Image (tube, rainbow, N blue to C red):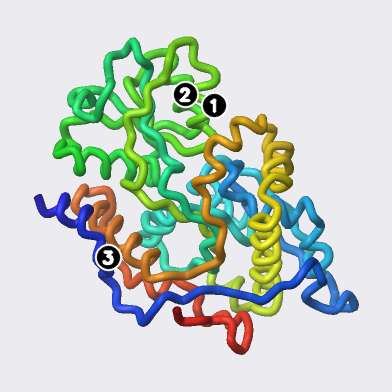
Amino acid sequence: MRSLDLLKIAVPVVAVVGVVSLYINVFGQKPIIETTTPLSSFRIAVSQTPLSAPILIAQYLNLFKENNLNVKLVPCFGGVDCAERMFDAQADFATSSESVVMFDSFKRNNFSILTTFVNSDNDLKLLSISNIGVNSVQDLIGKRVGVVKASSSEFYLYSLLLVNGIDPKQVNKVYLKPEDLAPELYSYGVDAISVWEPYGYQTELKASAPIVNIGTQGIYHLTFNLISMNEYIHANESSVRTLIRTLDQAVNWINNNPVKAKNIIAEMLQLNYAQLSWSWDDYVFRLSLSNSLLSNLQLQARWAKESGLVNGEIPDYRQFLATDINLEPDGLVVE
């Protein structure tokens, strides 16, 4: 029961005073820096999901260019892929869930989270085909479930199993790439899949038989974050500060123009509007570095450790938050 109690009682396990929020006062779309400043160039590995909306909107509205940032977006599929591209020096920044950060923290300590820019308690889905006969989490015992290794997909499945009193060892995990989850379900290679959006909606849209969602909203609170290598951050602090402020401009614009934002993201990701609207209201766009993020990282690290998925001591996740990047004289606000 120790793991179940750990999941259900998500107490703060890392001592940090207050909630650190990155809040920058941005009015309109006025450039943040003088246009005479030389352009700063860098690459962002961006997961092709609506969760990446602040970065995609900033590119679409030319906010990067207005703030003298020459940004190349490098498309990738899921936070694992994006982080690997950054670690392989194919990108300077990457988008990833906190689960990816947690797994990578056991391998290296030379990167940091710059900011969380969106969170959701309903982005993950656990889907099956109706004729398979998996209509509840209890039906997963002895079944094969497709997951993306070392990602939020895997942790979401674990969370659901524990909350429903099922030993994770009673379910057979099948590791797949994000884009392979639905095809494997359609061909009955697996009995269910743990998947994030927009793959969840696409799975339902393209299925030849009705899809059953046996997941539960609120079981897992996902965050999507911007990460970078520590050496790069400290060598480019001014540009990093400008990048974060530009994302804050984009977040404000999204929150003030939700319909326009959805149309833009649907166009950029080649999603239909109905598909995007299906999950959009579950997203909370806001820049932050919070105690809840630290608690989530610590909770998932204990799960990974107990499950034998990682080796070594659980890191001090306070060291993985780039709170030393002073965004404004009063930019780090304790709430």
Residue at which label 2 appears: 182
Residue 273 lies left or right of residue 37; in this view the side is left
- Distance of label 1 from label 2 (alpha carbons): 8 Å
The residue that label 3 is drawn on is: 314
Amino acid at pointer 1: Gln
Q: Is residue 328 or residue 27 the one in the foreground?
A: 27
| 10 Å crowding of disc 1: few (<14), some (14-19), many (20+) | few
Distance Cα–Cα, label 3 vs label 1? 36 Å
* Callout 1 touching callout 2 (CB < 8 Å): yes
Up-down relation of residue 206 to residue 270 (above or below): above
The three-letter code of the residue at mark 2 reads: Ala
Q: Position of residue 141 (x, y in %)?
A: 18, 26
Q: Residues within 10 Å of mark 2 (few under 14, many from 20)?
A: many
Residue at the outermost bottom position: 329
Quadrant in which the C terminus is drawn: bottom left
Instruction: Tell me which corner region of the image, top left, top right, bottom left or bottom right, holds residue 49.
Output: top right
